[in-house]
Amino acid sequence: MPHSARDRLIVALDMPSLDEATRLVAKLGDSVTFYKVGLELLFAGGLDLAQSLRASGKHVFLDMKLLDISHTVERAVANASELGLNFLTVHGHDLKTLKAAVAGRGTSKLKLLAVTVLTNLGQDDLRLHGTTLSPAELVLRRAKMAHDAGFDGVISSGQEAAKIRETIGPGFLIVTPGIRLEGSTMDDQERVTTPESAISSGADYVVVGRPITQSGDPKASAESFVHHIREARRKTTRA
Ligand code: C5P
C-alpha cells in the first residue's frame, strides 16, 4: 500500500511514441512516482519503457485490460508476472477469466486489478450491451466477483468507490480513472469525479492522463493533483 499522497497519483502515459513518453517522464521528474503504460504506448515500445521505469525506482501499472479464454489469460498473466511490474489489469466480465488470472499470477507480487465498467461508458452504452443494470450496479457486481476470485482490487470510477468500499471493506484496492479538476474538460469520459471526491469515497489511487500529459506545464499540473489528493486525505483523516 502507498504511504504518501504522491504515491497515490498514477500518471497515464497515453502517448503516441516512446520519445514523447520519455520526454514527459523527464519533465515530471520527482513529481510523479507511479506511471501507467497502456495499449497506445504498448505498440510503440511501452513494455521496454515500463521495465526501465521500474529499474529507475518508479512504480508501474501495466494497463492491458486482458480478456480472452481462461488458458490464454492464465499464460499471459504468468509471463507478465515475470516482468517485475506492480499492477496489471484484466477485464472483470466473468469469474473464469478472473480465476485464470489469479492462477497465472502464482506467487508473484504483481497486483491484479479487475476493470469493472470502463469510465467512458454510461447507462445508454450498457443498454446497447443488453444489460438493464445501472453502471453502479454492474460495477458492484463485478467488484464482488473480482474479490471472490482473489483479485487485489478494481478499477472503477469515483462515483462507485464508496459503495465498493462499504460492501467489500478495507484492503481491497480501488483505483480510479476519469479524474478531472472542477470545471475542466471531460474529454471522452462519462463518469468523472474530482480527486477529492474519489479519495474521500475510498479510492486508494487516482489515474490521471490528459489533464497532466496535455498540460502546458505537466509538472505543475501533477503537483496540483498531488495537492488535491493530500488535502482530500487530510480531510478524511487518512493522510
Ligand atoms: O486522459 P484520461 O485521464 O481520461 O485517462 C484515463 C486513463 O485511464 C486512460 O489511460 C484509460 O485507458 C484508463 N481507464 C479509464 N477507465 C477505466 C479503466 C482505465 O479511463 N475504467
Image (tube, rainbow, N blue to C red):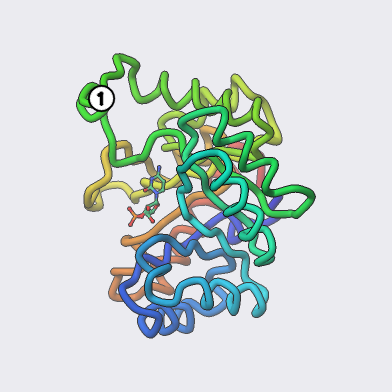
Q: Nearer the viewer, residue 228 or 119?
A: 119
Which kind of residue does numbered mark 1 sit on?
Answer: Gln
Residue 59 occupies which quadrant of the picture?
bottom right
Whole-percent x, y for residue 85 in the image: 64, 63
Residue 19 occupies which quadrant of the picture?
bottom left
Among all residues in the image, which is located at the extreme top? 132
Q: Is residue 166 left or right of residue 196?
A: right
Q: Nearer the viewer, residue 233 or 154?
A: 154
Whole-percent x, y for residue 88 in the image: 57, 52
Task: State the residue at coordinates (49%, 50%).
Answer: 206
Give the number of marks.
Answer: 1
Q: Is residue 37 above or below residue 159?
A: below
Q: Is residue 123 above or below residue 133?
A: below
Which residue is under mark 1? Answer: 123
Whole-percent x, y for residue 20 in the image: 36, 81
Q: Residues within 10 Å of mark 1 (few under 14, many from 20)?
A: some
Element type where label 1 sits in the image: helix
Whole-percent x, y for residue 70 in the image: 56, 39
Task: State the residue at coordinates (51%, 32%).
Answer: 201
Task: State the residue at coordinates (44%, 66%).
Answer: 222
Q: Nearer the viewer, residue 118 or 168?
A: 118
Task: State the residue at coordinates (40%, 23%).
Answer: 136
Instruction: Say if disc 1 is inside 8 Å of ligand 1.
Output: no
Q: Is residue 163 above or below residue 197?
A: above
Q: Is residue 65 left or right of residue 106?
A: left
Q: Is residue 153 left or right of residue 19?
A: right
